[in-house]
């Protein structure tokens, strides 16, 4: 039987989490697959995936959001196959930034100018879809470090926007 890996939170801050991975077995480990999940504005679950080579590992994930719950799941790739998943939860420290205030204005039938307020020197995600269900499950999206972007959309459709 292959045991799940042990995920240990080494440290965390406002914008990063450091964790270690190890196996409590003599089975040869070739690497790990790690997923970091968080919920974006209750509408959209986000995920980062890390593929890590080797038996033991300490990883640091940066560019995270302050005071946000994160779930880390991992499984090991071994000579006998994949291990079961293991999970840990951690909330980054600090104060969560205020939600941006979004304004969306149609420029023409296929372009929408989106602008918002918020802190500088951060990455913003812009999500848009024609329904709440699509906005939650599989929205169109893009990222930018600026406070405005022009989004190209399909004509004769109404869109929902989230930043």
Image (cartoon, helix red, strand yellow):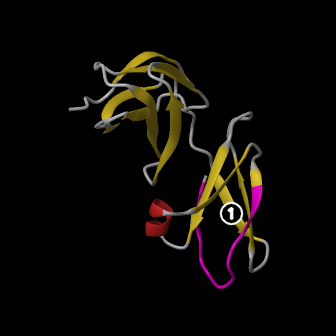
The picture places residue 161, in percent across and down from the top left corner, at 59, 62
As helix, strand or loop, the secondary structure at mark 1 comes to strand
Q: Is residue 106 above or below residue 97?
A: below
The answer to whether one can see residue 21 in this image is yes
- Frontmost residue, 51 versus 88: 51
- Frontmost residue, 39 versus 33: 33
Residue at 55 percent across and 32 percent down: it is: 65
The picture places residue 16, in percent across and down from the top left corner, at 55, 24
Q: Decide whether residue 151 is among the magenta residues.
A: yes
Residue at 52 percent across and 19 percent down: it is: 13
Extreme residue in the bottom direction: 156
Residue 24 quadrant: top left
Residue at 44 percent across and 41 percent down: it is: 37
The picture places residue 69, in percent across and down from the top left corner, at 41, 33
Rate crowding at label 1 as few (under 14), some (14 to 19) or many (20 or more) other CA atoms within 10 Å.
some
Position of the N terminus, as image quadrant, is top left
Q: Is residue 84 above or below residue 67?
A: below
Residue 60 quadrant: top right
Residue at 44 percent across and 32 percent down: it is: 32
Q: Decide whether residue 142 is among the magenta residues.
A: no
The residue wearing badge 1 is: 104
**What range is drawn magenta here?**
149-162
The answer to whether one can see residue 16 in this image is no
Extreme residue in the top direction: 10
36 left or right of 104 in image: left
The picture places residue 57, in percent across and down from the top left corner, at 48, 20
- Frontmost residue, 82 versus 130: 82
Q: Is residue 146 above or below residue 71?
A: below
Number of numbered discs overlaid on the protein picture = 1
């Amino acid at each position: 039987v292959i045991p799940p890996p042990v995920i240990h939170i080494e440290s965390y801050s406002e914008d990063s989490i450091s964790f270690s991975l190890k196996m409590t077995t003599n089975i040869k480990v070739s690497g790990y697959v790690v997923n970091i999940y968080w919920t974006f504005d209750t509408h959209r679950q986000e995920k980062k995936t890390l593929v890590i080579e080797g038996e033991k590992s300490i990883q640091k994930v940066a560019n995270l959001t302050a005071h946000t719950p994160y779930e880390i799941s991992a499984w090991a790739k071994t000579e006998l196959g994949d291990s079961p998943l293991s999970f840990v939860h951690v909330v980054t420290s600090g104060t969560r930034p205020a939600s941006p205030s979004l304004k969306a204005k149609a420029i023409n039938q296929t372009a929408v100018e989106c602008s918002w307020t918020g802190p500088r020197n951060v990455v913003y995600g812009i999500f848009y879809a024609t329904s709440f269900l699509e906005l939650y499950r599989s929205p169109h999206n893009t990222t930018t470090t600026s406070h405005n972007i022009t989004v190209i959309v399909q004509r004769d459709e109404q869109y929902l926007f989230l930043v």
